Amino acid sequence: MSNKIAVRVENVVKSFTGGDSRVFALKGASLEARFGEILMIVGPSGCGKTTLLSVICGTLKFEEGQITVFDKDLGTMRNGEITRFRRENIGFIFQQFNLIPTLTAVENVSIPLILQGKSRTEAEKRARAVLEQVGLGERFKSYPNQLSGGQQQRVAISRALVHEPRLIICDEPTAALDSVSGHKTLELLKASALKPDRCVIIVTHDSRIYPFADRIVQMDDGHVIGHFDDHTQIQHA
Ligand SMILES: Nc1ncnc2c1ncn2[C@@H]1O[C@H](COP(=O)(O)OP(=O)(O)OP(=O)(O)O)[C@@H](O)[C@H]1O
Ligand SMILES: [Mg+2]
């Protein structure tokens, strides 16, 4: 891990309005994620973890504060610019994998490259190489419903990494997996996603994967309430 900052979130406020009520999901949250590290974000349901990931990716706008990702100030970027920046620089992994059921493994993994304008042949060649790296070389023509949960998550990891993004964002990546598959997923992320010029941010409830974190940020009620270098220091509510 280096001390160079990949993502900086400073005093970010984000609220949602529905009818006549307003919910503050982030109430001045701040954190730093460094190059070469796995940063985990933990905290109770509803405390703002997914919202924080969404503002870091630029898929949600925030109202106050500042976010910089690789020295780019998201608050000053236009929507089209943020979309392009995200396609180039960010890979996503979700709890439910979010694979497209009508596409095969290799077609699912090709998507980020196709969005970047690569030809289908070139995209699928690269996608197959990544699937081979995660041990799914034999299954590249399978559809998601023909694969186990752990295998589907490996396809999702391949899709997140295929365009070699510098920031990998994971929202509950092991929640739908048994403990062996969850452990394997983290090992794979650590081996394939983590490089000195990259950063991995993982939101999780799953204390079994805490030992994979280089640092842990604890959230509660829209705030970051602690930074820990060691998962045994986390305060359990
Ligand atoms: N689109 C939305 N509209 C209205 N309220 C929302 C919206 N998204 C999130 N919220 C509210 O913002 C708060 C934070 O939600 P968020 O999804 O960030 O929590 P979380 O920490 O990811 O929870 P979980 O662990 O259950 O996934 C919650 O009170 C939630 O109800
Ligand atoms: Mg969430």
Image (cartoon, rainbow, N blue to C red):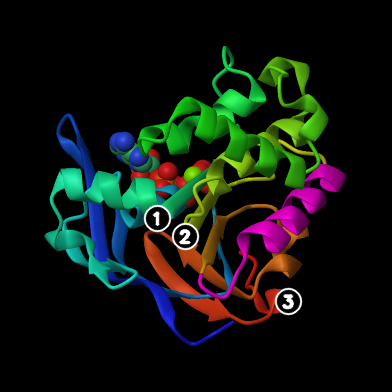
User: Can you tell which mark lies on residue 89?
Assistant: 1
109 shown above or below 80: above
Tell me the CA gap for discs 3 and 2: 26 Å
Q: Which residue is mark 2?
A: 167
- The amino acid on which the numbered mark 3 sits, given as a three-letter code, is Thr
User: Where is the N terminus found, in terms of image quarters?
Assistant: bottom right
Q: Which residue is mark 3?
A: 232
Q: Are marks 1 and 2 in contact (CB under 8 Å)?
A: yes
Q: Position of residue 172 (x, y in %)?
A: 60, 46
Q: Position of residue 61 (x, y in %)?
A: 21, 49
Alpha-carbon neighbours of circle 1 within 10 Å: few (<14), some, or many (≥20)?
A: some
Residue at 48% x, 48% y: name it: 91
- Regarding mark 3 in the picture, which secondary structure is present there? helix
- Regarding mark 2 in the picture, which secondary structure is present there? strand
* Chain-order first, disc 1 or disc 3: 1
* Chain-order first, disc 3 or disc 2: 2
User: Where is the C terminus found, in terms of image quarters?
Assistant: bottom right
- Residue 55 magenta-highlighted: no
- The amino acid on which the numbered mark 1 sits, given as a three-letter code, is Asn
Residue at 68% x, 56% y: name it: 189
Residue at 57% x, 17% y: name it: 103
Residue that extends furthest to the right in the rendered view of this protein: 180
**As rendered, which of 132 and 177 lies closer to the eye?**
132
**As rendered, which of 179 and 233 lies closer to the eye?**
179
- Residue 190 magenta-highlighted: yes
The magenta-colored residue range is 179-197
Q: Position of residue 135 (x, y in %)?
A: 81, 41
